[in-house]
Image (cartoon, rainbow, N blue to C red):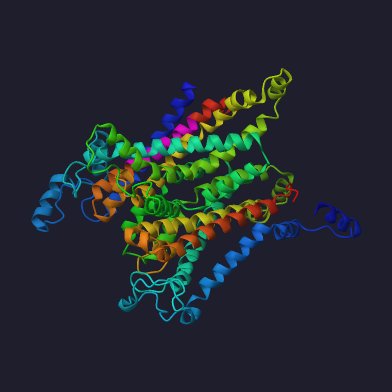
Amino acid sequence: MLKYTIRRLLGMIPMLILISIVVFTLAKLMPGDSLSGEIDPLNTNPEYIAEMREKLGYNEPLPVQYFDWITGFLQGDFGKSTRFKVPVADVIIEKIPNTLFLGVMSLLITYILAFLMGMYSGRKPYTIGDNAIAGVNYIMLAIPSFVAAVFAIYFFSFHLNWFPFGGSVDILVEEGTLDYWFSRLHHVLLPALVLGAMSTASYTQFLRNDIIENSRKDFVRTARAKGTPLKKIYNVHILRNSIIPLVTFLGFDFAALIGGAIITETIFTYPGIGQLFLDSVTSRDYPTLMALTMLLSFLTLAGNLIADILYGIVDPRIRLD
Amino acid sequence: MASTTTISQQKKPERSLSPWQIARKKFLRNKLAMASSIFILLVTIMSLSAPFVANFLSPLPDVTKVNIGSMNIQPNGEHLLGTDKSGRDVLTRLFYGGRISLLVGFSATLIVVTLGTLVGSIAGFFGGMVDNILMRFTDFVLNFPFLVFVIVLNTILYGIVDGLWVLILVIGVLSWGGVARLVRSKVLAEKENEYILAALSIGCSPWKVIRKHLLPNVMSTIIVQATLIFASMIVAEAALSYLGFGVPQATPSWGNMLSSANEPDVLQGKPWIWMPPAFIITLTILSINFIGEGLKDALNPKSLR
């Protein structure tokens, strides 16, 4: 397993280099100084710009510039945000906890919903309940996340007044108190629900089919012959076997969450990485934009890698090729 | 239903149906898929006829002009779905919006399927080094976070090329990876058959084998996949337009129309502005998915329905 993991990790390096080259090329195509953010975009004095360009090494050949940028990037120097006038790294770090919180909550919601629905459907396949769950799942899969988000705000925030419709915390509560955490939770619940519902359908169907398949296997027949209660067979014997393949979904979810976060965070005006990304486009904060592009690409890559490795753990046959 | 088919088969055993005829029969019998097809047909007709019927739909047939005198009118006899915050008729915009949404969806799907099939079939058929290089490239494309790159590319290209085609090109070029993988795996399985060996042994060129022998046999998979991609491309366009990075704001598209829901005032108090596009997007996506499922069923020789 270790050998497989190391091989996968090494295989990621050329991919990372390629992606960094693409991001660098895109950054160079962007108007202005999109990598360091040191040149003040409001100062149009040509002498100033020429001097800064020389100082920042923009007159060097492109490969040298790339090398300078990537070494800086690896050491955590993401340039300076033109909007906030502080290092991009600081801007991003400030927003990460919010997005992380949202991501974890939405995963939790996905797992809870998928578990409840999948176990019921798997245990009672082809019944009304199973069909109803399949129908709901189908609709959840088909509704685009932004439409779902708009409807969620309309019904739950405006009509029922259950949830706030934006932000990550009430302004008035003091940080660190119990109220503060409740307020955080209250704010994150609706976006997390919308984000989490997106991937619930595939989890549910997978769990259902796996439980049905497993319930026909010999070990179930043995357990039944021995007189094990049906409830125990489903909740212990079968579930243990059916959960394992689900683990592999986690890595792909990672990538899906990134795209989903951009949309949901923007709609719910939730101050996280996704909103920062879109804001940096509209406010032409290109250094932040490029740093985030690099970061999000890296996360997607890491997600796919995790999925691959988890596959290897779950199904040892994959490791051979 | 099963009993009637067996009787009719016993009556006339003369000629068996071709695979496509069987598929068509199965599809026509699938009520959900047929209802969805009719809905999509209606939406298509509605979109295509927009410039011709605009004059009959409302007193304000111009969808790009701001009409200060008729802002935020609730649905009534004159404006069946009301007007939006710039005084433009919602129903007329819905008709015109369909044009953009379907055009983007269709063109992007065409790009995705063409690129994916090309790369997938070449990689699968030639194998070895070619396969390795092409598939690493596919992995590379698949590893890009889609939304992030579409937005960045749009920002760079915006203003250089016409907005709509930038969008189509960008979302098309970034999403063919999945199709390429699928086609490759199908071609890999298909090329082991003897008829391919036979075709090669009588001197068919690789291109002819791919075109005449391999592709027709993986066509059913591609068609099903294309349907699902069509749906996801419409979603991509709407999502990007909703966020303000898709079709230029002045052009009516379903995503652009929905983006008015970004204002709390519209979202809360004027649901007639954003609900029609929200419903039509959802119904369109749902219908296309049902059609895809129906096609999958119909084209699968093993399914019994």
Point 55% across, 28% down: residue: A244
- Percent position of residue B98, x then y: 48, 67
Judge whether A226 appears above or below A243 on screen. Answer: above
Q: Quadrant of residue A213?
A: top right
Q: Is residue B15 left or right of residue A206?
A: right
Overall secondary structure of the magenta section:
helix
How many callouts does the rendering have? 0
- Percent position of residue A159, x then y: 40, 54
Q: Is residue A199 left or right of residue A63?
A: right
Point 42% across, 66% down: residue: B272
Q: Is residue A217 magenta?
A: no
Judge whether A291 appears above or below A281 on screen. Answer: above
Residue extending farthest to the right is: B11
> From this viewpoint, is residue A87 visible?
yes
Point 49% across, 61% down: residue: B279
Q: Is residue A299 magenta?
A: yes
Q: Quadrant of residue A319?
A: top right
- Percent position of residue A215, x then y: 68, 29
Q: Nearer the viewer, residue A82 or B209?
A: A82
In the picture, the quarter occupied by the C terminus of chain A is top right
Point 8% across, 55% down: residue: A47
- Percent position of residue B304, x then y: 75, 48
Q: Nearer the viewer, residue A123 or A55?
A: A123
Judge whether A238 appears above or below A144 on screen. Answer: above
> From this viewpoint, is residue A304 visible?
no
Region of the chain picked out in magenta, as a range: A295-309
Q: Nearer the viewer, residue B114 or A103?
A: A103
Residue extending farthest to the top is: A226
